[in-house]
Structures are given as C-alpha cells and as structure tokens.
Image (tube, grey):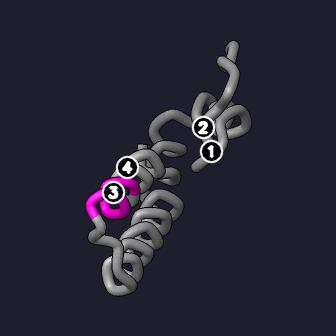
C-alpha cells in the first residue's frame, strides 16, 4: 500500500512536470519515515496482536515487494 502510494505520486509529479530536487528529497524523507514507522512500530504491534499467525504471514509475504502469485495458507 505504501509503495503503491509513493509510486503513484511520483508518477503524477513526473506527468505534470512538478518533480524537482526539493520535492524528491522531501518525498525520500517521508518514505524513510514511513519505512521506519512500519519496521519499529507497526510490525512489532502486529506481532504482539497476532503472534504465530503474523510470523507465518511475514515468512510468506515480503515487506515492500508485492507477491506475484497467491499465497495458499
């Protein structure tokens, strides 16, 4: 979800000619902040809430790269 949102906005910036170094730097900082939030808050919270089920999910689904094939539980 996060990756798709970032790529969509990047595409719009390029399409409408608004991509400049300052905007790109700000976007990189935001992406880094989101990545750190996911790694240090969201994932540990989900691990506590769902335990072994979430660990199994993490073994089968990458953090940022979407799956190309369905995951059969």
**Residue at disc 4, secondary structure:** helix
Q: Which residue is mark 4?
A: 8
Q: Secondary structure at mark 1?
A: loop
Could you tell me which secondary element the residue under label 3 belongs to? Answer: helix
Q: Quadrant of residue 19?
A: bottom left
Nearer mark to the viewer, of 3 and 2? 3
Q: Is residue 60 magenta?
A: no
Mark 2, Cα crowd under 10 Å, few <14 / some 14-19 / many 20+, is few
| Residue stretch rendered in magenta on the structure | 11-16
* Circle 3 Cα neighbour tier, 10 Å, few/some/many (<14 / 14–19 / ≥20): few
Mark 3 or 1, nearer chain start: 3
Query: Circles 2 and 4: CB distance less than 8 Å?
Result: no
Residue receiving disc 1: 65
Residue beneath the point at 51% across and 34% down:
50
Residue found at x 39% / y 77%: 24
Q: CA distance from mark 1 to mark 4?
A: 15 Å
Rounded to the nearest angstrom, the CA distance separating label 3 from label 4 is 10 Å
Q: Residue furthest top?
A: 72
Q: For this rendering, which residue is in front, 1 or 45?
A: 1
Q: Residue at x 71, y 32 (%)?
A: 60
Q: Nearer the viewer, mark 3 or mark 1?
A: 3
* Front residue of 23 and 65: 23
Residue 15: horizontal and vertical position, in percent?
Answer: 33, 56
The total number of labels drawn is 4
């Amino acid at each position: 979800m996060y990756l798709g949102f970032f790529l969509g906005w990047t595409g719009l910036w390029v399409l409408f000619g608004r991509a400049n170094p300052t905007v790109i730097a700000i976007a990189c900082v935001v992406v880094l902040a989101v990545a750190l939030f996911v790694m240090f808050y969201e994932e540990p919270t989900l691990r506590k809430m769902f335990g072994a089920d979430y660990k199994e999910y993490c073994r089968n689904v990458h953090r940022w790269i979407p799956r190309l094939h369905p995951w059969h539980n």
